[in-house]
Image (spheres, rainbow, N blue to C red):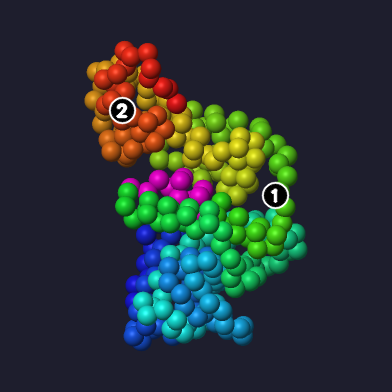
Amino acid sequence: MRNEPCFVGTSVTVGIFRCRPDDPAFEDSGPAEHHCFVFPRTSVWIQHAGQAAFVADPHVVTFYNPGQEYRRRVLDGRGDACEWFAVHPDVLREMTSAIDRAAADREACGFDHSHCLSDAWSYVEQRRVFRHVTNEAPDPLLVEETALRILWRLLSGARNLPPLPVARGAVALSEAVKGLLARSFADRLTLGQLARALDTSVFHLCRAFRAATGTTIHAYLSQVRLRASLEPLLDGTTPLTEIALAHGYSSHSHYSSAFRAAVGMTPSDARQARHAPSIMVP
């Protein structure tokens, strides 16, 4: 059995679980350790203690609270393969309270259902996040913000709730975020750092920024970094690796990949064609 974290942040931890059907721990691998939501890669019967069994397959997300006891039964010859996202209790409490005000009065927070269907966007995004934390130097802002967006989508979708209205002060808070990004765009920022600097919570920060701007903090930061890099890039003398590291990218290849995705050409191509009138600035 393999069960280990791949990314540990202040608000979210991302991990991998693999267990073959012939593993002694397959039926019972012990109670859950965290508040977590899980995306199955294979199909397996899951039964939470005291509840009916259900099929956990790639169209389902399962939820666990710390201490939750559960059992598995074999359904797929490959066993149980999944990725899990553990969320900090304070963040989960704020999310569930936004859906159900009565949850704010309960001493213990947690998920109140065992599973729900996952939409295609949530499944694709969690795969993208997992590939990011296992194949690259993870960007903590990207990982945590995306994971919290996925969780909010799952929780609100499970209740069939309408979108929340724009929070009061969202515009002012989003402008304050932009001010911080302008001064610190080259740093490896986290949601926790931004929230503490603005005396707010990570959940409120993400929701307010997206409501006011229509985009995520990470996507906005990516554009700030990219545009700031254009001046030294087009000057034609500063080495590309130096430009990348000075503007918050982990490597030359990271910078090139982001630049190509936004502009449609590599930084080297843009530098070589800098005198052409057809260069498109993102």
Q: Position of residue 20 (x, y in %)?
A: 35, 79
Q: How many marks?
A: 2
Query: Is 138 colored magenta in this rendering?
Result: yes
Task: Report which residue position mark 1 lands on.
Answer: 163
Quarter of the image with the N terminus is bottom left
Left or right: residue 159 versus residue 223 is right
**Quick one: which residue is furthest to the right in this view?**
102
Say above or below: 40 vs 24: above
Q: Tell me where residue 108 sits by quadrant.
A: bottom right
Residue at image point 41% right, 22% down = 280
Q: Earlier in the sequence, mark 1 or mark 2?
A: 1
Residue at image point 33% right, 47% down = 137
Do the residues under discs 1 and 2 have CB atoms within 8 angstroms? no
Q: Tell me where residue 235 sits by quadrant.
A: top left
Task: Report which residue position mark 2 lands on.
Answer: 267
* Nearer-the-camera pick, 77 or 246: 77
